[in-house]
Image (tube, rainbow, N blue to C red):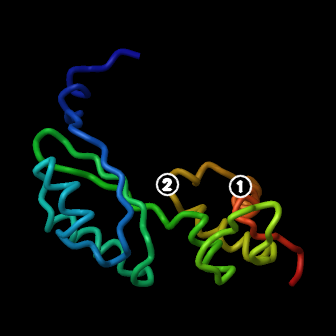
Amino acid sequence: MATTLKDAVARKPVLATIRLIVPAGAARPAPPVGPALGFYRLNLMAFCKDFNARTQKYKAETPMQVTLTAYKDSTFEFVVKSPSVAWFLKKAAGIETASGRPGHNVVSSLTLRHVYEIAKLKQSDPYCKHMSLEALCKSIIGTANSMGIEIVKDL
């Protein structure tokens, strides 16, 4: 497929792709955000205001995954993803850390309903939209098993 001149001009040259984990509604120009964006001479306050506005519906201190694309003209775009599956599983199970020996030590049990609810939340992620709910559930069950969390039909 040949690209036209208009397409080539419309595409901005990418300087870097930055991946961060920032607490919801708590982006400040201090570390970890400040040094990561300051290195590429990006507007810290614009990012912080925009990020905090986008994540205000989430509970405070929820770790949000951010993929930020920095362009050579000092502009940027970013995508906010929901928290990791491991974080959701730990919250649902009420544990701080996963098992040190998964498969040997079971630290907690969750029902299939918990798995289904987490899958519904993760389905809103831009990279999980194409996955079926069943595939997401299987992936979440695999993550739970690797953390030492047992999945049962009913508690």
Helix, strand or loop under label 1: helix
Quadrant of the image occupied by residue 132: bottom right
Q: Are marks 1 and 2 in contact (CB under 8 Å)?
A: no
Mark seen at residue 139: 1
x%, y% of residue 52? 28, 75
Of residues 29 and 100, the one nearer the viewer is 100
Look at the picture and state if 143 lies above or below 112: above
x%, y% of residue 59? 44, 84
Within-10-Å neighbours for mark 2: few <14, some 14–19, many 20+: few
Q: Locate the C terminus and report the quarter of the image it occupies.
A: bottom right
Of residues 43 and 121, the one nearer the viewer is 43
Mark seen at residue 126: 2
- Extreme residue in the right direction: 153
Q: How many marks?
A: 2
Helix, strand or loop under label 2: loop
Identify the residue at horizontal 60%, vertical 65% (top origin).
86
Q: CA distance from mark 1 to mark 2?
A: 16 Å
70 to the left or right of 79: left
In the rendered structure, which amino acid carries the disc numbered 1? Answer: Ser
Q: Earlier in the sequence, mark 1 or mark 2?
A: 2
Quadrant of the image occupied by residue 16: top left
Q: Which callout, 1 or 2, points to the residue nearer the camera?
A: 1
Identify the residue at horizontal 22%, vertical 46% (top origin).
70
88 to the left or right of 39: right
In the rendered structure, which amino acid carries the disc numbered 2? Answer: Pro
x%, y% of residue 109? 79, 77
Mark seen at residue 66: none
Look at the picture and state if 131 lies above or below 96: above
Identify the residue at horizontal 73%, vertical 70% (top origin).
116
